[in-house]
Amino acid sequence: MPITTTRLIAPVAVLAALPLLVWCQKPPEPAPSPAPAPSPAPTVVIDSTLNRAALLAALSEAGSALADGRDRNAALSGRTVSVRLPFGCGGSVSPHDATVSGLPRLIRSHDGGLTLTVTPEDLKARIAASGVAPAAAAALDQWDAIEGFWIARPWSGLDACPAPAVVAPDDVATAASPEAKVEQDGSEPAKTTEASSSTVSTVPERTAGLAAVTEADSSRLGRRQGQAYAHVIRGERGIAPAPAPGGYALRLEGRLTTFADGKAVKCAQRNAESRPVCVAALRLDRLAFEDGATGALLSEWRPR
């Protein structure tokens, strides 16, 4: 029987449509997953509280700007401060009659007890007595009191007692001794008095500190009027207490404010060869004595 054209076209059409039918029966490929959203950058929380090291850095920068004749624009006003000032390190006890304003000290009382004390320095009286210009003297009227607290060892940001001093090598110590002078040139060293040969207490350098300011129109509650802050440690059963091996610490907390020139730090320099003296204006909120090693609170005051 002859093959017609219609019979040939049908199978050919089916074969041509077969790939299309197979493709239609395939499950659809999953759509590509969207790219993950980038994770947000971590929030960096900057602690605005200045500790001893940060405060000393700010004071040093202000002193350098004064010495170099540069203007400084550090935004310090409003920053909180928590500064720890170690003292009485190594059990060192100051003489009972030794008075250094603005520096904490450890003294042995007449009854054998230990007294931790600090007497703020009257910076307002000191500035007024230095013969300042009338404009500067008028600016002092906004403050009822300016009480200074000095930072001993301002070259160190360590807020704990330092390690014992390194003893000089034998050759250096020998070269500096009077006996070495006799061996070297045969001359007789000058006779020294007993006072000069004895150990002389060194007054810490007072070139960096905090000036606790009190406004003239502020409340007088909690005012100390320059009185010393003191904490007494008494012995037990008649035995005098021993100083803490890690010393003690004075902690000052508050918020920086500004002087009359709108800046939080004030510096003065006697001459080009002397180190600038810089203080930061502080609204003192808390003063405390702590154990130098453990940080345990011994006593505290809240002037405001």
Image: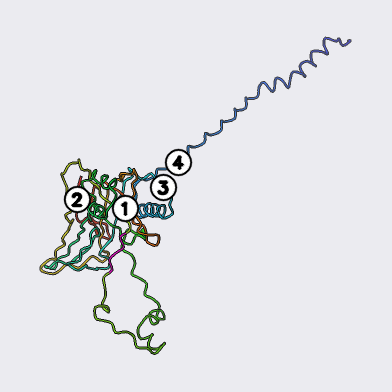
Marks 2 and 3, how far apart at CA: 34 Å
Would you call the spot at circle 1 few (<14 residues within 10 Å), some (14-19), or many (20 or more)? many
SS at circle 4? loop
Which residue occupies 45% across, 41% down? 42
Q: Which residue is drawn at 27% across and 47% down?
A: 134
Left or right position of 26 against 129? right
In the picture of the structure, the residue carrying the numbered disc 2 is 301
Are circles 3 and 1 on residues that touch, CB within 8 Å? Answer: no
Q: Which amino acid does label 2 sit on?
A: Trp
Q: Depth-wise, is mark 2 or mark 3 nearer the camera?
A: 3
Labels 2 & 1 near each other (Cβ < 8 A): no
**Please, is residue 192 above or below residue 10 in the view?**
below
Give the residue number, with chain letter if any, for mark 4. 42
State which region is magenta: 202-206
Q: From the top left corner, tell me how far across and down residue 45 is, in percent.
A: 40, 43
Residue 21, image quadrant: top right
**Marks 2 and 1, how far apart at CA:** 22 Å
State how far apart marks 4 and 1 are (Cα): 36 Å
Q: Quadrant of residue 2?
A: top right
Give the mark toward the camera: 2 or 4.
Answer: 2
Residue flagged by tag 3: what amino acid is it?
Arg
Q: Quadrant of residue 159?
A: bottom left
Left or right placement of residue 42 versus residue 117 in this view: right
User: Of callouts 2 and 1, which one flags the residue occurring earlier in the amino acid sequence?
Assistant: 1
Give the structural element (helix, strand or loop) at label 1: strand
Give the residue type that dot 4 points to.
Pro
Per the image, the residue denoted by label 1 is 279
Q: Which of marks 4 and 1 is in front?
A: 1
Name the residue that disc number 3 marks: 72
Percent across and percent down for residue 94 are 21, 67
